[in-house]
Image (cartoon, rainbow, N blue to C red):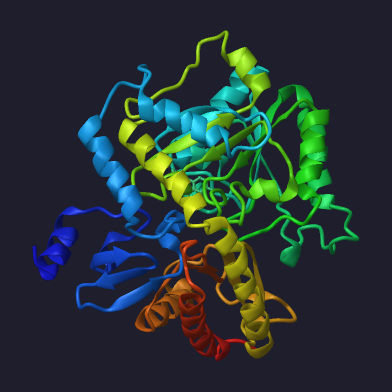
């Protein structure tokens, strides 16, 4: 099919997610490899956002491609109720990297249904129903997961699943309590306990948080926050669920982001990096105490394609690549390059209010004025209000950088296999585009 036919049939027959269809003019991509992608004209882009922050090992890793082929030849599908080699082996391989006693796994299709199943399990285990989540959160787009989500993707599809109570985030750059870390003494964490008290602990089943907030502005919790949440949940007999769909699998320099604070939640939800997006797969990692109860009762959950053998085969190979290619180590080392580079960019650019991240999970927060911190593009801006973000994105693409620009956040989250020269090349393009953004800042 010629690239012009690809575009024509796409326009005619394909409905894209999260888009106003008539406003779309998607790139036609013909090839990807490592940290690069090529369009129909042979133009090369550095993927500085790992697609949907899922291609952690990079594009078209030969070992994972081979593992998928091998698994397809052996067995493509067998019902979820059957014990099968790639399923069992993946459980064992995952148990080697999950923290604490989170050693049993319910395999899902992706992140949204991992979160929905974690909620079901929390409700079955605690016999309570309320779930506390945060405003700057995204937990998936299915109807249950969007109910858990705090961000602007939820209100347009309300009413949604009831029983979700929301709290404020540990967003130090714009503290909801007007305080500064560490003199704040983690007021944001303590406010979660206050909310549990008002809602009454007897009704609250779980607190569900992204260990590091991704799409809503890359919020790395200050040290002590996750530890405090753990204490609060334990004290109130509320489960702690860590959503590691985006932050997990080396993105934050460790197998799971929460490992950076040595906290063991009661469940971890995961997806994206589990197979690096090569085949859809998610999972809920479940603690021993929950499994002791679940082992004796019906699990009211399951989809036809759960624990798909092909996806399990891809995941086994992906886990091995993280180790063999030393991707966690590289994420930490390259994260330091970003830290240093963005520090000097901050000094040069009027529009760069904050640059924050951990491992290879970073965002630049763009502002109109560093003193007032007024965002360059408003939270939830759409259409004409988001024109600046669109223009920034256009200029990045012209410079050969593919990334996500969401409102006033510009994401820097390349595949974990990125080399220093590739990273510097991408950052140089971003640096140049910030000159344009500077013209709109005071
Ligand atoms: C933190 C988080 N949780 C859940 C999801 C939903 O995952 P999926 O799109 O695989 O359903 C996402 C997707 O971006 C995410 O970032």
Q: Looking at the image, how many numbered discs can be counted on the residues? A: 0
Quick check: 247 above or below 315?
below
Out of 162 and 192, give the one closest to the viewer: 192
What residue is at 87 percent from the left and 60 percent from the top?
A: 182
Quick check: 94 above or below 41?
above
Out of 184 and 130, give the one closest to the viewer: 184
Image coords of residue 256 (percent x, y): 61, 46
Image coords of residue 93 (percent x, y): 50, 35
Task: Report whether residue 217 is seen.
Answer: no
What residue is at 58 percent from the left and 15 percent from the top?
A: 294
The quadrant of the picture occupied by the C terminus is: bottom right
Task: Report whether residue 246 is seen.
Answer: yes
Left/right placement of residue 301 relative to residue 351 reads left
What residue is at 31 percent from the left and 21 percent from the top?
A: 79
Image coords of residue 252 (percent x, y): 61, 56
Q: Residue furthest top?
A: 296
Q: In which image quadrant can residue 194 be found?
A: top right
Left/right placement of residue 157 relative to residue 80 reads right
Out of 398 and 318, give the one closest to the viewer: 318
Out of 410 and 278, give the one closest to the viewer: 278
What residue is at 37 percent from the left and 65 percent from the top?
A: 34
The quadrant of the picture occupied by the N terminus is: bottom left
Q: Residue furthest front?
A: 324
Q: In which image quadrant can residue 86 be found?
A: top left
Quick check: 94 above or below 129?
below
Left/right placement of residue 180 relative to residue 272 reads right
Quick check: 16 above or below 199?
below
Image coords of residue 241 (percent x, y): 64, 36
């Amino acid at each position: 099919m010629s690239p012009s036919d690809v575009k024509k049939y796409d326009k005619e027959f394909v409905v894209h997610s999260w888009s106003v269809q008539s406003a779309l003019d998607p790139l036609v991509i013909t090839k990807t490899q490592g940290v690069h992608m090529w369009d129909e004209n042979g133009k090369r882009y550095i993927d500085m956002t790992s697609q949907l922050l899922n291609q952690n090992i990079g594009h078209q890793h030969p070992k994972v491609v081979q593992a998928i082929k091998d698994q397809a030849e052996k067995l493509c599908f067998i019902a979820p109720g059957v014990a099968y080699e790639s399923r069992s082996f993946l459980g064992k391989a995952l148990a080697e990297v999950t923290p604490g006693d989170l050693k049993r796994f319910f395999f899902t299709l992706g992140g949204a249904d991992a979160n929905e199943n974690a909620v079901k399990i929390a409700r079955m285990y605690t016999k309570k129903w309320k779930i506390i989540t945060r405003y700057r959160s995204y937990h998936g787009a299915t109807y249950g997961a969007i109910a858990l989500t705090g961000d602007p993707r939820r209100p347009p599809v309300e009413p949604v699943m009831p029983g979700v109570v929301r709290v404020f985030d540990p967003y130090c750059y714009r503290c909801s309590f007007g305080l500064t870390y560490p003199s704040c003494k983690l007021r944001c964490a303590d406010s979660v306990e206050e909310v549990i008290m008002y809602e009454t602990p007897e009704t609250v089943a779980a607190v569900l948080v992204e260990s590091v907030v991704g799409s809503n502005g890359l919020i790395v919790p200050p040290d002590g926050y996750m530890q405090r949440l753990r204490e609060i949940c334990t004290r109130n007999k509320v489960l702690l669920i860590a959503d590691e769909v985006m932050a997990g699998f080396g993105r934050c320099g460790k197998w799971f982001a929460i490992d950076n604070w040595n906290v063991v939640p009661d469940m971890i939800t995961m997806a994206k990096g589990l197979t690096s997006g090569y085949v859809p797969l998610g999972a809920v990692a479940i603690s021993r105490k929950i499994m002791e109860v679940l082992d004796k009762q019906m699990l009211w959950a399951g989809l036809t394609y759960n624990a798909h053998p092909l996806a399990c085969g891809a995941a086994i190979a992906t886990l091995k690549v993280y180790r063999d290619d030393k991707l966690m180590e590289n994420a930490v080392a390259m994260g330091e390059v970003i830290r240093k580079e963005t520090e000097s960019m901050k000094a040069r650019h009027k529009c760069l209010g904050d640059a924050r991240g951990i491992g290879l999970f970073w965002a630049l927060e763009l502002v109109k004025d560093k003193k007032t911190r007024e965002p360059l593009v408003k939270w939830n801006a759409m259409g004409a209000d988001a024109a600046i973000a669109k223009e920034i994105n256009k200029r990045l693409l012209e410079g050969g950088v593919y990334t996500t620009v969401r409102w006033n956040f510009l994401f820097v989250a390349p595949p974990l296999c990125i080399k220093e020269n590739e990273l510097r090349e991408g950052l140089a393009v971003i640096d140049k585009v910030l000159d344009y953004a500077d013209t709109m800042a005071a």
